């Protein structure tokens, strides 16, 4: 039997994983994709966020990637 809360379990599990590399294989899942996008904080993550923004079929993931990309670009401009 499938739980009505299966998305919540995946999302909570993804929040507890600190190594974003481990989540990238599951970026297609909209709940994990959102969590993954919010963990991207390094200048090397810009390319990945841009790809996620371009390729994700889930609006929530694209929105999270766009927001994180904006924050990351702003932080990188301050460093320069």
Image: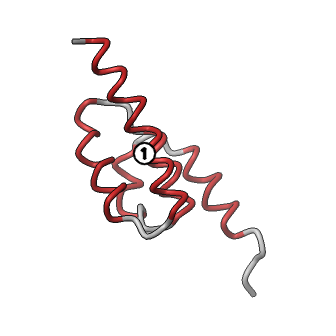
Q: Is residue 73 left or right of residue 59?
A: left
Residue 55 percent across, percent down from the top left = 33, 65
**Neighbourhood count class around disc 1 (C-alpha, 10 Å): few under 14, some 14–19, many 20 upward:** some
Quadrant of image for the N terminus: bottom right
Q: Is residue 30 left or right of residue 79?
A: right
The answer to which image quadrant residue 52 occupies is bottom left
- Relative to residue 58, is residue 3 depicted above or below? below
Tell which residue pokes out farthest to the bottom in this image: 1
Q: Secondary structure at mark 1?
A: helix
- Name the residue tied to disc 1: 66
Q: Residue at x 62, y 56 (%)?
A: 11
Residue 72 percent across, percent down from the top left = 36, 29
Q: Residue at x 31, y 60 (%)?
A: 54
Q: Residue at x 37, y 38 (%)?
A: 69
Q: How many marks?
A: 1
- Relative to residue 4, is residue 66 depicted above or below? above
Q: Residue at x 60, y 53 (%)?
A: 13
Quadrant of image for the C terminus: top left
Residue 16 percent across, percent down from the top left = 57, 44
């Amino acid at each position: 039997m499938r739980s009505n809360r299966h998305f919540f379990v995946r999302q909570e599990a993804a929040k507890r994983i600190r190594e974003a590399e481990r989540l990238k294989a599951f970026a297609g899942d909209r709940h994990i994709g959102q969590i993954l996008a919010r963990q991207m904080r390094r200048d090397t993550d810009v390319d990945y966020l841009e790809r996620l923004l371009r390729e994700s079929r889930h609006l929530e993931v694209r929105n999270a990637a766009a927001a994180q990309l904006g924050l990351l670009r702003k932080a990188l401009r301050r460093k320069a």
